Image (cartoon, rainbow, N blue to C red):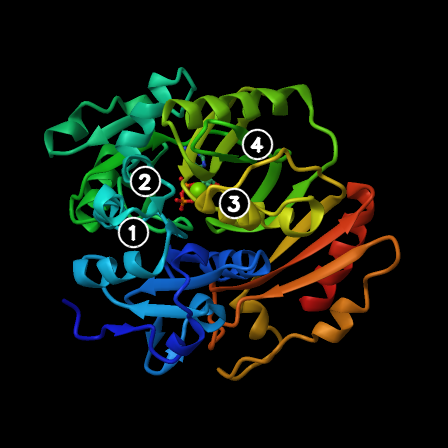
Amino acid sequence: MSKERTLGEDRDKTLGASRERTLGVLGNGQLGRMFVQAAQAMGFKTIVFDPEAKTNGVLSPAAQVSSGFVNAAFTDTEALQSLAEQCFAVTTEFENVPAQALAFLADPALSVGVAPRASAVRIAQDRVLEKAHFASCGVPTAPYYVLKGEADIATVPPDFYPAILKTARMGYDGKGQVTVHSADALQAAWSGLLQVVCVLEKRLPLASECSVLLARGADGHTIHWPVQRNVHVDGILATTEVELNESPQEAMLVAAAQKIATDLDYVGVLCVEFFILADGTWVVNEIAPRPHNSGHVTMDASSMSQFEAQARVTAGLPLVQPRQHSSCVMINLLGDRWFEGVDSASPREPDWARVLALGSAAVGVHLHLYGKAEARAGRKMGHINVTAATLAEAWQTAASIQQLLR
Ligand code: ADP
Ligand code: MG
């Protein structure tokens, strides 16, 4: 049992006895925060469960807004049991939560709804299992090799390079990835990653990147949002754009994402990332068994946000196909913006008043900040959604915002 454990500390007074109205979430980041806010808007109380829900007296982005929190390890079964006593259903905001925690909570004796299921999270958190699932769905991926032992390196043909070495587990935002141009470089890079199980993917010529966000209920009913087009900088999402109308290729991506979800018998919000290649063909990249950074556009451009959908699925409430009412550009706000034009190490809050003044009757400018105590380079601090009738209009204002924040 974790010594750090503090059950519902600070907030337990606000939690009444009504387990039937309380939802739990594993994880304490911004995705958990926005889930909590959406769940609360629907009248639920929430409990955030994370080993760092509170660190050195500072509450995490999700714990700050939650009705209650549990500061305990994901392997702390006593604390999980207590969570189950306080919540009628539990979800997760990140995929690296141990699948055993979800499996533990799913014990019928606890009578807690768990979405997504441990079986789906187990696949999504392991690139080897994930790719095998895509193959079983008949959905194309980048060519790849699995590296488990020294001998596997010799099986990679010379014309396979350049290739990207990715750890099978625990990667995010481009972390745990190295581009290699030869077998020697692969050998060195793999040693650098301590020879954990990896996949080696052929580096493909990308024309663009897309994601499809969907939500699937326990009854199999599935809803989806229009395809999101994503631009990454240094492996981290920089902007997402979404239009009102779907192209024929985009309809194919949606069908592939639905197949991937159905064959997993997935329950919850799922994001499927795709690469569009220079020759116009496409492959699936990876899945996230939770709301996704690219899906933040749904918060202001759709009749249902990804977080409301997560609250609905978790609580067993109906999903209905959302209506996209605006085109949208999302600008991710990384901590770097807090240091621009500042020559010292002390960050400065960007001038939000000037950003917000760029909105108009035709263009919505929606600021979302995650309440993180400290700005750091590469850290996701918030995002801005710019909504308009057309993507061109949204981009015009988004460009002015980028200019202002530079
Ligand atoms: P993460 O879990 O960090 O999001 P991804 O596998 O999505 O890892 O890779 C991060 C980014 O790296 C992708 O969004 C893409 O820009 C680039 N990338 C990853 N794999 C490939 C590939 N096989 N070919 C070309 N670019 C790639
Ligand atoms: Mg990715």
Location of mark 1 (residue): 97
Q: Is residue 237 above or below residue 275?
A: below
3D distance between C-alphas at marks 3 and 2: 19 Å
Q: Kindly check if marks 3 and 1 are in contact, taking CB atoms under 8 A apart as contact.
A: no
Query: In the rendering, which numbered label is found on residue 340?
Result: none
Q: Is residue 238 above or below residue 186?
A: below
Quarter residue 20 falls in = bottom left
Q: Is residue 254 above or below residue 115?
A: above
Tell me the mark number nearer the camera, choosing from 4 and 3: 3
Location of mark 3 (residue): 312
Locate ligand 2 by image quadrant.
Answer: top left
Location of mark 4 (residue): 223
Q: Amino acid at mark 3?
A: Arg
Left or right placement of residue 116 versus residue 67 in this view: left
Location of mark 2 (residue): 121
Q: Quadrant of the N terminus?
A: bottom left
Q: Kindly check if marks 2 and 4 are in contact, taking CB atoms under 8 A apart as contact.
A: no
